[in-house]
Image (cartoon, rainbow, N blue to C red):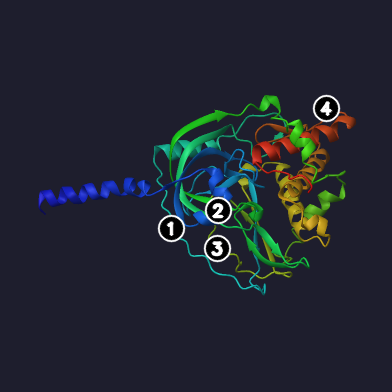
């Protein structure tokens, strides 16, 4: 082959990654969350803070004024990354559900697993050393520039008609509450921030706490733990709950609204547990947590099944606290350093401290807002 032609072909191959990156649309987390469907299928470049925690693997926004101020982050299939959520619950319609859905066919993304990515993945998967039980607690958050395919939708979660029946499902990953998902292609400009677990997290600002009265948690009951565990059904029972052990950081093999499995009520719940990171009583606690979500969504009470994302998580964390008490845990801490239970707290302080810890975790770490009553 002519040496000049060979040189041109070689340079063309080397330029492909840079060319693809140059075609990325520069945007921000808030701009995407304002109109996620407008970015659907586009390659975007954003800069943001990435967290990996209990049910979280996302790029957080700040001041976006959305119910969920974050974009779910996903690796392409087969990436075998280490970072990701400890557990997750995905919603799908059963194969036997009467709703007609459109199958999703998105272009594949190839992840550049270079030195920057390996550093990024390692930082987010480094566990924190804490006292007591700490669920999905990582040592670092990471700020980086991310390039990838943006998947966006207007609606999230199970979509119900005026009578309360489920007629559709939308959204991405945990509880399908994310309106946008970034399938990672490359990462650069990485900086890490170590989380200080000694401070007990950042409290919810007083003004936010006084304004956010859309959900009043009430007192948890011992029955919530049994109810959460029972949501998974008896051994061998086919109740629409599917359990998988492994990571939940990649786009799912079946990325469509409908499952390949049937369900008695047409609703399928895919619970994924990272078993390698769930030791001792932690698995029991996580099962009842995700089970509370399932039981609430299937509840005949509109006030329970239609809870906001904030309200749903608050109830599930109340169940987790009850489980921690039953297991005689010394303390229960959440990612970001938010303590929601400590054996040393007095009975009079338990409710106040637990509510403050859960609220701070949801607002400041998970980036879920609790809109005030109209």
Disc 1 designates what residue?
A: 108
* Position of the N terminus by quadrant: bottom left
Point out the tag, 1 or 4, that comes first from the N-terminus: 1
Q: Position of residue 164 (x, y in %)?
A: 77, 65
Disc 3 designates what residue?
A: 254
Q: Which residue is drawn at 37% across and 49% down?
A: 23
Query: How packed is label 4: few (under 14 Cα within 10 Å), some, or many (20 or more)?
Result: few
Disc 4 designates what residue?
A: 344
Question: Nearer the viewer's eye, disc 1 or disc 4?
Answer: 1
**Count of numbered circles on the image:** 4
What is the distance, in whole Å, between disc 1 and disc 4 at their CAs?
Answer: 51 Å
Q: Which residue lies furthest to the left in this view?
A: 2
The reply to whether the C-beta atoms of the residues labelled 2 and 3 are less than 8 Å apart is no
Q: Which residue lies furthest to the front in this view?
A: 374
> In terms of secondary structure, where does tag 4 sit?
loop
Point out the tag, 4 or 3, that comes first from the N-terminus: 3
Nearest the eye: 86 or 156? 156
Q: Residue at x 68, y 31 (%)?
A: 337
Question: Nearer the viewer's eye, disc 4 or disc 3?
Answer: 3
What is the distance, in whole Å, between disc 4 and disc 3 at their CAs?
Answer: 46 Å
Query: How packed is label 3: few (under 14 Cα within 10 Å), some, or many (20 or more)?
Result: few
């Amino acid at each position: 082959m002519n040496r000049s032609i060979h040189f041109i072909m070689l340079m063309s191959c080397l330029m492909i990654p840079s060319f693809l990156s140059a075609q990325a649309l520069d945007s921000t987390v808030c701009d995407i969350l304002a109109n996620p469907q407008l970015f659907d299928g586009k390659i975007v470049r954003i800069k943001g803070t990435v967290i990996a925690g209990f049910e979280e693997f996302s790029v957080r926004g700040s001041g976006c004024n959305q119910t969920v101020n974050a974009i779910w982050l996903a690796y392409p299939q087969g990436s075998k990354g280490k970072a990701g959520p400890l557990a997750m619950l995905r919603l799908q319609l059963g194969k036997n559900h009467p709703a007609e859905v459109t199958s999703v066919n998105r272009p594949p993304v190839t992840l550049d697993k270079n030195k920057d990515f390996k550093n990024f993945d390692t930082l987010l998967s480094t566990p924190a050393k804490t006292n007591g039980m700490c669920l999905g607690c990582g040592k670092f958050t990471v700020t980086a520039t991310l390039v990838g395919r943006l998947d966006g939708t207007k609606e999230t979660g199970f979509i119900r008609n005026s009578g309360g029946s489920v007629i559709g499902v939308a959204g991405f990953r945990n509880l399908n509450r994310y309106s946008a998902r970034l399938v990672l292609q490359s990462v650069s400009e990485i900086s890490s921030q170590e989380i200080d677990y000694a401070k007990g997290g950042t409290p919810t600002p007083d003004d936010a706490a006084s304004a956010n009265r859309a959900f009043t948690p009430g007192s948890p009951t011992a029955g919530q733990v049994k109810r959460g565990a029972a949501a998974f059904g008896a051994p061998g029972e086919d109740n629409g709950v599917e359990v998988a052990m492994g990571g939940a950081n990649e786009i799912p093999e079946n990325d469509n609204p409908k499952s390949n499995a049937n369900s008695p009520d047409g609703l399928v719940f895919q619970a994924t547990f990272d078993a390698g990171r769930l030791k001792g009583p932690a698995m029991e606690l996580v099962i009842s947590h995700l089970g509370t979500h399932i039981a609430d969504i299937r509840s005949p009470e509109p006030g329970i099944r239609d809870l906001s994302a904030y309200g749903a998580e608050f109830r599930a964390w109340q169940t987790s606290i009850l489980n921690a008490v039953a297991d005689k845990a010394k303390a229960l801490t959440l990612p970001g350093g938010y303590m929601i239970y400590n054996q040393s707290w007095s009975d009079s302080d338990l409710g106040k401290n637990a509510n403050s810890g859960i609220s701070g975790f949801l607002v400041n770490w998970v980036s879920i807002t609790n809109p005030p009553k109209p």
